[in-house]
Amino acid sequence: MQLQTTQQLISFKTALWFWMTPQSPKPSSHDAISGRWTPSATDSAAGRFLSYGVVTNIIDGGIGCGKGSNPQVVDRIGFYKRYCDLLGVGYDPNLDCYNQRPFALRTCGLVFTSYVMHQ
C-alpha cells in the first residue's frame, strides 16, 4: 500500500486496474457503468442492477450498501452528479445502493462479505 500512496504512476495504474478488472463475483466498475454487465438472478434478488449504485457496491459495498442512507454514499453521489453536470451528461435516478446487498467475496470455497479497511 505504501507505494500506491507515494508513487503517482503506481496509484493511477492501481486505480485503472481496479476500475477495469472484475473480481468475482463482482463485475468490473467499467462493465457496470457502461452497460456491459448483465445482472444474474442472484444480483436481481439482491437489488443489484445496472446503475451508478452498483458501482458504489463494487467499490465498497460492505461499508456503504444495504444500510440505508449514509454520508459516504451521499457524498459519492454528489460528486458523480457534479461531474456529470460539468460534462453535460445525464444520469439515471438509481444512484444509490441503500437497498442493495453487498457482493460476497469467494476465496478457496469460503464466502466473505466485501469490506474496505480504513486506517
Image (cartoon, rainbow, N blue to C red):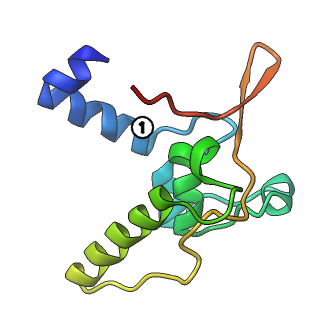
Residue under pointer 1: 18
Left or right of 84: which side holds 28? right
Left or right of 84: which side holds 19? right
* Image location of residue 60, percent across then percent down: 54, 44
* Image location of residue 116, percent across then percent down: 52, 33
Q: Residue at x 36, y 77 (%)?
A: 81
Q: Is residue 47 above or below residue 4?
A: below
Q: Residue at x 32, y 18 (%)?
A: 1
Nearer-the-camera pick, 34 or 117? 117
Q: Which amino acid does the dot numbered 1 rest on?
A: Phe
Is residue 99 in view from this perspective? yes
Is residue 35 in view from this perspective? no
Q: Is residue 65 above or below residue 115?
A: below
Q: Quadrant of the C terminus?
A: top left
For label 1, the SS is: helix
* Image location of residue 36, percent across then percent down: 56, 60
Left or right of 54: which side holds 12? left
Q: Is residue 10 above or below residue 43?
A: above
